[in-house]
Image (cartoon, rainbow, N blue to C red):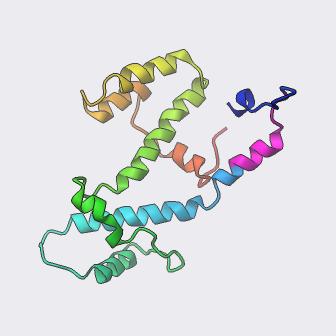
Amino acid sequence: MLKQYAKHCKTGEVIPDAPEVRVKRARKFKQGFATVEYAAAALLDMRWHTLADGREREAASFEREVLKAIRMPDTIVPRYRTTYFQHIFSGGYSSGYYSYVWSEVLDADAFEAFKEKGIFDPTVARSFRVNILEKGGSEEAMTLYKRFRGREPAVEPLLERRGLVAARP
């Protein structure tokens, strides 16, 4: 797509490969770190929301216990702390922090359909429009997604996008 639009303003020459390669590499910088940060936040959030006994807890102690239990590396200081979850506790979507990463899984896997058939493939675009966009919340989301993609979402496209696994040929 970059080759189609990134052209010299006067000559119309297509962008050379070198800057494109640097841009692609830069996207993957520190993705392992960011993935661990988000996974830790999602697990911490889930632990808070699955407490069954209803007793009060000291937030910092509970957080330390959870991070130890999930074997959070000491070298990664959590960026998303318990006290940052106010929007989750008061905003009506308890234990939903994982949804940030889940939405990236869906995004990467859906985009993979376009990459497989061609970014501008009208059949894929129509299927996405008819099976996802037009339906909205009228049916179960996974049913709609499987209708579009022919299967459940795969995590591999996100892992590839982040540079955490080798890209498939």
159 lies above or below 37: above
Q: Main secondary structure of the magenta part?
A: helix
Magenta stretch holds residue 23: yes
> Closer to the camera, 130 or 83?
83
Residue in front for this viewpoint, 134 or 150: 134
Q: Residue furthest front?
A: 10
Does the magenta run of residues contain 127? Answer: no
Q: Residue at x 58, y 58 (%)?
A: 31
Residue 166 appears at what percent x and percent y? Answer: 64, 49
Q: Position of residue 159 (x, y in %)?
A: 54, 50
Q: Position of residue 17 (x, y in %)?
A: 81, 39
Could you say which quadrant of the image residue 61 lies in?
bottom left
Q: Say which quarter of the image contains residue 149.
A: top left
Residue at image position (25%, 28%) is 139
Horizontal side of residue 146 vs 11, given as left or right: left
For the C terminus, the image quarter is: top right
User: Is 141 displayed left or right of 115 in the figure?
Assistant: left
Left or right: where 67 falls relative to 91: right
x 49%, y 76%: residue: 77
Residue lying at the far right in this picture: please name it.
11
Report the number of discs: 0
Query: Looking at the image, which residue is at 25% across and 33% down?
Result: 140
Q: Quadrant of the N terminus?
A: top right
Residue 18 lies, in percent from the top left, at 82, 44
Bounds of the magenta segment = 13-24
